[in-house]
Amino acid sequence: MKQNVSAPIYSITPFTLLDYPHQSACIFWFSGCNMRCLYCYNPEIVYGKGRITFDKALQFLKSRVNLLDAVVFSGGECLLHKKAVSFITEVKKMGFLIKIDTNGSRPHILEELIQKELINYVALDFKAMPAKFAKITQSKLFIPFAKSLLLLLHHTVPFEVRTTVHSDLLNKRDIQEMVFFLENLGYSGNYYIQHFINGSSTIEKLGHSFKELENQNIGTEKIKIHFRG
């Protein structure tokens, strides 16, 4: 999948208190993705070309040293870019905490970042179990996702698992199956369910999504469900 190598970043959110737990941060939105999730809120980033070079992004960060705690790498899929590791290395040298938002499709890149101690927090998107994964993501990348999950489970980097739910695509039984999958692999702690935001511009035109899960018993003793949106 082609990206604008010279300008891989689509845009920058200069300040957020919502995207890195308990830290002030900025967000680098990387263009391009290897999934086409039907509910994706960022079609302009997924299909668009980058506008900001790594050099310009580093110049921006120099003005934020001692003002921001962290940098969030998001997208799109930030780990698709060939120079992502070297860029993250430079950002880390500046003293920022690093959070990665990823669909888990690049476990080898994630492993390299972990081995080099370059990341401080990971948000891993769990799209669906295999029966619905291909339909929702328009990809065949469940196995790489599972490898990324196992990698995180076997290391000490803090991470969260999160799932976006549109009621036409995932139901209570689907989420229960996903919870059991996580638990069987040894995951415990918080599992974040992000309700689809109706009215959003998305890759696929979807109908109204209903918040049908909040009154359902879908957590376990080891996995606590938290709802967002």
Image (cartoon, rainbow, N blue to C red):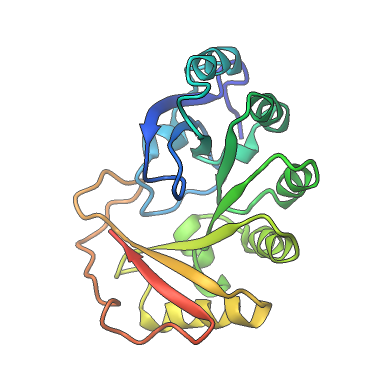
On the picture, is 77 further left or further right than 155? Answer: left
**Looking at the image, residue 176 lies above or below residue 229:** below
The N terminus sits in image quarter: top right
**Looking at the image, residue 191 lies above or below residue 18:** below
Q: Nearer the viewer, residue 77 or 21?
A: 21
On the picture, is 202 further left or further right than 157? Answer: left
Which residue lies at the image location 61% right of the left edge and 57% below the top edge?
A: 158
Q: Position of residue 183 (x, y in %)?
A: 59, 80
On the picture, is 106 further left or further right than 202? Answer: right
Query: Which corner quadrant of the image does residue 25 belong to?
Result: top left
Query: Which corner quadrant of the image does residue 124 belong to?
Result: bottom right
Which residue lies at the image location 58% right of the left edge and 27% below the top edge?
A: 3
Query: Which corner quadrant of the image does residue 193 belong to?
Result: bottom left
Which residue lies at the image location 26% right of the left edge and 82% below the top edge?
A: 215
On the picture, is 20 further left or further right than 229? Answer: right
Q: Position of residue 23 (x, y in %)?
A: 46, 42
The image shows a total of numbered marks equal to 0
The C terminus sits in image quarter: bottom left
**Looking at the image, residue 115 lies above or below residue 215:** above
Q: Position of residue 194 (x, y in %)?
A: 36, 61
Which residue lies at the image location 68% right of the left edge and 48% below the top edge?
A: 106
Q: Position of residue 79 (x, y in %)?
A: 63, 39
**Looking at the image, residue 151 lies above or below residue 45:** below
